Amino acid sequence: MNLYQSKNSNILSALKEKPFKLEKEIQNIFETNLQDIMGLQLVKSEFSIKNKRIDTLAFDKESQAFIIIEYKRDKNYSVVDQGLTYLNLMLQNKAEFILTYNETIKDTLLHSKNIDWSQSRVALVSPSFTENQISAADFKDFGIELWEIKQYENNIISINSIKKSSSAQSIKPLLQNSEKLKEIKENILVYTEEFHLKRYPEEIRELYEIYKNAIVNLYDGIEIISKKLYIAFKKDRNIADIVTLKKGIKIFINLKKGQLDDPKGLMKDVSETGHWGNGDYEITVTDTENLEYIMSLIKQAIK
């Protein structure tokens, strides 16, 4: 991706890339801005366990899962080996990860029963990845994320999450005969839209597709991210969630009570009741009668 600076008379001047001198520079950028970049809580920098050093230990409050982040300035490493090593390390030392969180983050105490270990993942951050590395990480149920970061003149930083392809296959057949990686094979799950839809009849799948397409067409760059309990729609942050049901779909809008302008009063206030999605507003739909109106409500959550 080329970046340009606009000058007089619409003339563009290409910004020159400034390579990072140290991996620590990349680490400092991510750790300082972890919530904005990845939506994660920083737990500890330079976390050592079992003779391994983890660059950054983070926690995803939405998924209730630990995230290991590693930074690489060069291209000479194996994405698969790195990812599997750290995932295995986490699953075999759960107590140490919880203890580290509780000793570092004083406002909340974590218990093992509240952690979704199936959502554990590793993020590898580098100025660039080779085609082979991207291909090696392209498994739909492989808890490895690739993030590309580049630095340019004029203090410009670009950060890009490399998405898995729509044709990504399962990694589990490759782990089938590995006793060493048994924990990963049995415990790590990467949820997909199909996971949420496969149990339901065709009419529910079609209803979901209609609302899904309407949401992503509200604004350029809306991402679809499947979680354990719902399918999230994000634009920089979460804007809406969908939960699939036997006779319809449930939609949540990620706004706090009092922030939504809903003249028709269709949305239910769930601010004081337990619910799976984010936000304080919920509606269950079985048809497309109020599709456009509901989209006008979701649009309010895009900032």
Image: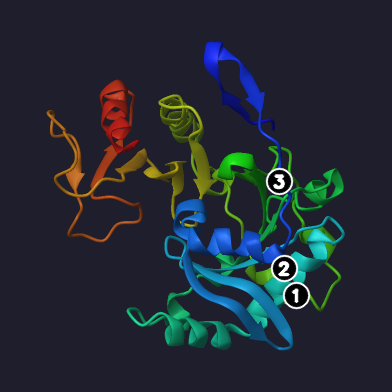
Q: Is residue 88 above or below residue 72?
A: below
**Residue 162 appearing in the image:** no
The structure residue drawn at horizontal position 62% and vertical position 20%, both measured from the top left corner, is 12
- Residue at 77 percent of width and 74 percent of height: 181
**As drawn, 53 above or below 294:** below
Percent position of residue 65, x then y: 51, 68
Q: Residues within 10 Å of mark 1 (few under 14, many from 20)?
A: few
Give the x, y percent position of residue 302.
34, 36
- Would you say 303 lies left or right of 56 here? left
Assess whether mark 2 and mark 1 are in contact (beta carbons under 8 angstroms). Answer: yes
Q: Residue furthest top?
A: 9
The residue pinned by badge 1 equals: 182
Q: Residues within 10 Å of mark 2 (few under 14, many from 20)?
A: many
- Residue 100 located left or right of residue 244: right
**Label 2 sits on residue:** 185
Q: CA distance from mark 1 to mark 2?
A: 5 Å
Pointer 3 local density, CA inside 10 Å: few below 14, some 14–19, many at least 20: some
Q: Amino acid at mark 1?
A: Lys
From the viewer's perspective, is residue 107 above or below residue 168?
A: below
Residue 238 or 293: which is nearer the viewer?
A: 238
Secondary-structure class at tag 3 = loop
Mark 3 to mark 1 CA distance (whole Å): 42 Å
In the displayed structure image, the side of residue 157 where residue 270 appears, left or right: left
Q: Quadrant of residue 272?
A: bottom left
x then y, percent, for residue 32: 49, 62
- The residue positioned 64% from the left and 31% from the top of the image is 3
| Count of residue discs | 3
Q: Which residue is mark 3?
A: 18
Q: Amino acid at mark 2?
A: Lys
| Chosen colour scheme | rainbow
